[in-house]
Amino acid sequence: MSISNNRLSTEQYEQNFSDIHPPFETHSAALVEANRCLFCYDAPCTKSCPTGINVPKFIKQITTENIKGSAHTILSANIMGGGCSKVCPVEKLCEGACVFNLMEEEAIPIAKLQRYATEKAIANNWQLFERKQSTGKKVAIVGAGPAGLSCAHSLSREGVDVTIYEKECKGGGLMTYGIAAYKVTPEFCEAEVNYIISIGGINIKYQQELGKNISLIDLQENYDAVYLGFGVGIARQLDIKGEELVGVVDAISFIYDIRTKGYPSIPVGDKVAVIGMGMTAIDAATQAKRLGAKEVTLIYRRTQAEMPCTEEELNIAKLDGCEIIWLATPKEVIGINGNVSSLICTMIQLGEPDASGRRSPIETDQTISLSVDMVIKAAGQIPFEGLVNNNKINHSKGKVSIDEHCATNIKGVFAGGDCVNGGKEVVDAVQAGKDGAKAILDFLLFHAKPLRGQGAKN
Ligand SMILES: Cc1cc2nc3c(=O)[nH]c(=O)nc-3n(C[C@H](O)[C@H](O)[C@H](O)COP(=O)(O)OP(=O)(O)OC[C@H]3O[C@@H](n4cnc5c(N)ncnc54)[C@H](O)[C@@H]3O)c2cc1C
């Protein structure tokens, strides 16, 4: 057993990481699917989209060859409608709500149609939105992820000048650095970010980190309002013996490397254990398998009935040949010469429902030992508690607290996305950015001199 890179040929890497949901090959194929839509008057698909995209309208526009209009309908509700068409768990959102499911027929492929229209808009750089004349107001945004970009675009449309401070050297947040490569490529993410900022009035300052190169007080001094969209980033530790051994990695760093360094350079074990059963765990497991790991086993402390990933995601892992051990939790990583050699897990029984409403895991005396050379931790992420504490921002276990107007306890400082909700989906972060922009516009309207030059009083 060993951890090594460069396990596959160039063609195998390309095949393994190619688009999991390929686009329509022809216009006619898109038309056939668009024409199946019943254009329901109550549009359950629209109601189930957190950004409220008018699905029947954009599909109707495709049927009438109005692709530009269709892209406008999508992007006016969700400026990351292109990316969302590739990464949204549509089986529990729009497509899951499609009435065809009730008739036991295939749901309309809404995501594929959405992709059809938005990819054309991005590829042809269709300018579908006009920026209003500059109002002279300036807003700083921390984080160029979906929440920050969506907030920036909505503000810019209203003539606000936006500066985004981003700690990485590319925008897109977890879209660019976190989501599985077979769902969305880094190249598409870059094109999407460029498309969003092509409206003008948005300046992204890269490699600028709040708490390191910039301070909240400086931003309050120099801008009329501030929006925090810095997400959640730190992987949760397992807090078990042997966690420091070579071969124990966290899923976020593992996926970050896959997305930034090129597939052949990423080391992966022969036998890999992945801890967790959320979207991140599935992405880590399937990508480890696609990098050439011989065996990948997902370990989850509850059962399929309680798992956080969707059934569709579980099926991707199963189809990739990943094994699953339900009702087990890691107890200790054993090593030989400092390298992982096995993982001991405690078996679990389910008890009464806990605060999450799911049956609680209770450890038994029974243990199992798995022979592995790599352990990937995907047991959730922890919010940036130190950052919010240092800036005296009210929070709940590190998640930024906001009121119904997206405002934090600090005057003129707003927040949204994963840093507030603790980690949901891209589409939720986009909506949070829109809500934040609306709240900031109201704030700018009612405060003639919002923040700048006031000595950043709280
Ligand atoms: C492994 C993984 C897979 C996922 N897969 C999916 C999926 O398939 N579909 C889906 O819909 N969602 C998925 N998600 C969730 C989704 O990516 C997030 O919900 C979404 O990106 C949140 O957007 P955000 O803007 O709030 O935060 P982020 O996307 O995290 O963006 C925050 C930005 O802030 C920057 N930043 C952080 N701290 C600072 C600082 N101090 N100063 C300056 N900048 C800072 C970060 O670099 C980042 O660019 C996944 C998440 C993970 C971790």
Image (tube, rainbow, N blue to C red):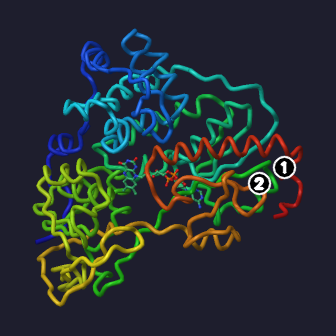
Q: Secondary structure at mark 1?
A: loop
Q: In this image, 388 relative to 265: left or right?
A: right
Q: In this image, 205 relative to 121: left or right?
A: right
Q: Earlier in the sequence, mark 1 or mark 2?
A: 2
**Which quadrant would residue 445 be assigned to in this image?**
top right
| Residue 12 position in % (x across, y down) | 15, 44
Numbered label attached to residue 450:
1
Q: Amino acid at mark 1?
A: Pro
- The single residue placed furthest to the top in the displayed view is 64
| Residue 146 position in % (x across, y down) | 51, 45
Q: Is residue 450 above or below residue 74?
A: below
Q: Residues within 10 Å of mark 1 (few under 14, many from 20)?
A: many
Query: Residue, x 86% and y 46% (percent of image)?
Result: 447
Q: Quadrant of the N terminus?
A: bottom left
Q: Is residue 306 above or below residue 10?
A: below
According to the image, label 2 marks what residue?
Answer: 412
Residue sitting nearer the eye, 431 or 362: 362
Query: Residue, x 34% and y 32% (percent of image)?
Result: 111
Q: Quadrant of the C terminus?
A: bottom right
| Residue 164 position in % (x across, y down) | 64, 47
Q: Residues within 10 Å of mark 2 (few under 14, many from 20)?
A: many
Query: Residue, x 11% and y 55% (percent of image)?
Result: 321
**Which quadrant would residue 410 be assigned to in this image?**
bottom right
- The single residue placed furthest to the bottom in the displayed view is 365
Residue sitting nearer the eye, 415 or 41: 41
Q: Secondary structure at mark 2?
A: loop
Q: Amino acid at mark 2?
A: Gly
Q: Are marks 1 and 2 in contact (CB under 8 Å)?
A: yes
